[in-house]
Amino acid sequence: MFELKVEQPINPPELTEAEERAREQFQAKKEAWVEDMVSECMHDNDWVVDAMISQLSDNPDTQNRLADLIMGHGDRSIIIANLKLDCMDWIRAELQKKADRMFV
């Protein structure tokens, strides 16, 4: 009835050593930019507020951590550190998307 075609995977292009090195350097530069921007954005109230709003609306773990912090359950410093890591992860993901668009 239906003819299904099996597609062969496309092999990535073979790069010369110089091209491979250039690609790796470009990738390292992009990753360094993301990490620098994460550090910078963690000191910007707007980025941190956006991260908290996003994480509290989407991430049940973050919701539970904030509830524990408000109720006084657990070690406060560990909960705050985990909330900070949640924000950093969200900011890193957003900046990675931006970097993917910028560094084409």
Image (cartoon, helix red, strand yellow):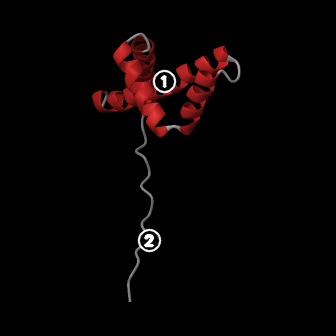
Q: Look at the picture and state if 32 lies above or below 1.
A: above
User: In percent of the image, x 68 and y 24: which residue is there?
Assistant: 73
Q: Give the amino acid type for the residue marked by disc 1 in the picture.
A: Cys
**Closer to us: 74 or 46:** 74
Q: Which of the labelled discs sits on residue 6, or is there none? A: 2
Looking at the image, the residue that sits furthest to the front is 71
Q: Quadrant of residue 8?
A: bottom left
Q: Viewer-nearest of labels 2 and 1?
A: 1
Q: Crowding at label 2, few (<14), some or many (≥20) Cα neighbours within 10 Å? A: few
- Counting from the top left corner in percent of width and height, residue 51 is at 42, 26
Q: Look at the picture and state if 80 lies above or below 103.
A: above
Of labels 2 and 1, earlier in sequence is 2
**Closer to us: 104 or 77:** 77
In this image, 97 relative to 58: left or right? left
Q: Look at the picture and state if 29 lies above or below 65.
A: above
Separation (CA) of disc 2 from disc 1: 43 Å
User: In percent of the image, x 36 and y 32: which residue is there?
Assistant: 97
- Counting from the top left corner in percent of width and height, residue 91 is at 43, 25
Q: Give the amino acid type for the residue marked by disc 2 in the picture.
A: Val
Residue named by callout 1: 87
Q: Is residue 23 visible?
A: no
Kind of element beneath mark 1: helix
- Counting from the top left corner in percent of width and height, residue 44 is at 37, 12
Q: Is residue 49 visible?
A: yes
- Counting from the top left corner in percent of width and height, residue 47 is at 37, 20
User: In percent of the image, x 58 and y 22: which residue is there?
Assistant: 70
**Closer to us: 1 or 40:** 40
Q: Where's the N terminus, which quadrant?
A: bottom left
In this image, 96 relative to 76: left or right? left
Kind of element beneath mark 2: loop
User: In percent of the image, x 37 and y 13: which residue is there?
Assistant: 45
Q: Quadrant of residue 104?
A: top left
